[in-house]
Image (cartoon, helix red, strand yellow):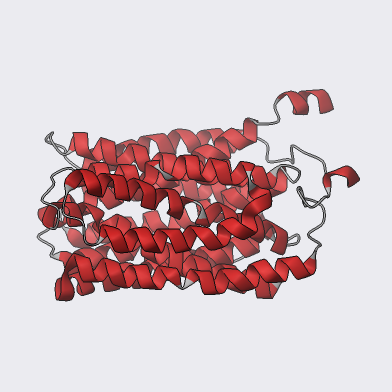
Amino acid sequence: MERGQRKNINDLSVLLLASIFMNGFETGGYQASLLYIGEEYALDHSAQGVIASVELFATMIAPIVLGSIADKAGKKIMLTLFTAMRVFSGIIILLATHSLPFAVGVFVLGFATSIIQYVAIAEMDDAYPVTKHKRMGGITAMYAFGAVIAPLIVGAAIKNSFGWKSFFASDCIISLILTILLWKISFEPREKVTDSDASEDNPAASSGSEIYFGGVALLCIIMFIYVGVENGVGFFLNGFMHDHVNSERGYFAVSLFWMAMIPSRILCGYFCRYRRFLLCAAPTGAAILLGVLSAVTNEYAAFVLVFILGFFCGAVYPNVLTYAADFSGTKTATVIAAITVATGVGGTVISAAFGFLETAIGFTGSFRILAVILALDLLFALPVVFDMRKKK
């Protein structure tokens, strides 16, 4: 039995990575589609900001409503059930003829996606306790990879008669297949922790059994700011390229933004021992790049800056998750759920506000305000870093 488990050690990991890939797929595709959705339903930038925040609001309330239930009811049941709910949400969106039913479908999609996100990450921690830090780079890179692919599909689909709905149709079909596969696989742990696994470079067995609430609170604030800014940029990047840079290839900029996160997050997994430095440097560098991007009017210069911006942004999430693994004790789903709530709140508030802000002062001023907000992450990252030094 042990030999068979060793042979198939990564079978569960593949499906967890696929689940995260689909979450990124949905995020990138929705961000790239927002401009065209707005055109179809006659929505201005303010209304687009509101409809973008509907999904993020669902992302916020899902963990509040269900909380730590995955630690009690079982992660397999939760992951399978809410992957099936993605299929249901896709059907609603595909049948929508105006903005209200579309918003309902997106709300259901955001609710399901939120549960999938924190349960899949928590299960990765539980199933792979020895290599969980290195796997965080991979799991967040898969999210970015999904967000790279989807805007390219939107860019190609917008030219056919089915338009942006082609993206949601593909999301629906893949989610149905994934639901079946998740139901069939075992969620038993694939690794066992030994005394030799606990070290400074691999603290898999040394994080204790209790939640470190002070550290978790700081991580939630960091992600509140980061995801809020990331969504503000992501949802309106296509519009920025269209209105400010006079480019019709804004969907490609969205794809580049997420593409840069893939190598960034993979490298973070390999260099997780340097997460103290990376947690501080990533939001600081991203804030500087966003400020520079706000003044650019050349298409190719914008593409380059968007890629570098994505590289810096990509490093925030995996480093937060490595700290979350250290701070969660035995309540992985509970801690990841709390962080997911914070990301949903940040995304909801900042995405909705950005639509109104852009209408009032334009893209340049709005992006600069987001840059200043993102720079605040450094103030909350420093206490995390210094506290971890004291703990060790």
| Rendered position, 179 above or below 238 | above
Q: Quadrant of the C terminus?
A: bottom right
Between 19 and 256, the residue placed more toward the observer is 256
Residue 79 x, y percent position in the rendering: 55, 48
| Rendered position, 99 above or below 136 | below
| Rendered position, 283 above or below 195 | below
Q: 119 left or right of 386?
A: left
Between 231 and 288, the residue placed more toward the observer is 288
Between 39 and 63, the residue placed more toward the observer is 39
Residue 267 x, y percent position in the rendering: 56, 42
Name the residue: 16% across, 37% down. 162
- Residue 65 visible in the shown view: no
Name the residue: 19% across, 57% down. 240
Residue 313 x, y percent position in the rendering: 44, 55
| Rendered position, 150 above or below 47 | above
- Residue 120 visible in the shown view: yes
Q: Quadrant of the N terminus?
A: top right
Q: Quarter of the image holding residue 332?
A: bottom right
Q: Quarter of the image holding residue 46?
A: bottom left
Name the residue: 53% across, 74% down. 379
Name the residue: 27% across, 37% down. 152
Residue 223 x, y percent position in the rendering: 50, 65
Q: How many marks?
A: 0
Q: Quarter of the image holding residue 107?
A: bottom left
Q: 183 left or right of 287?
A: right
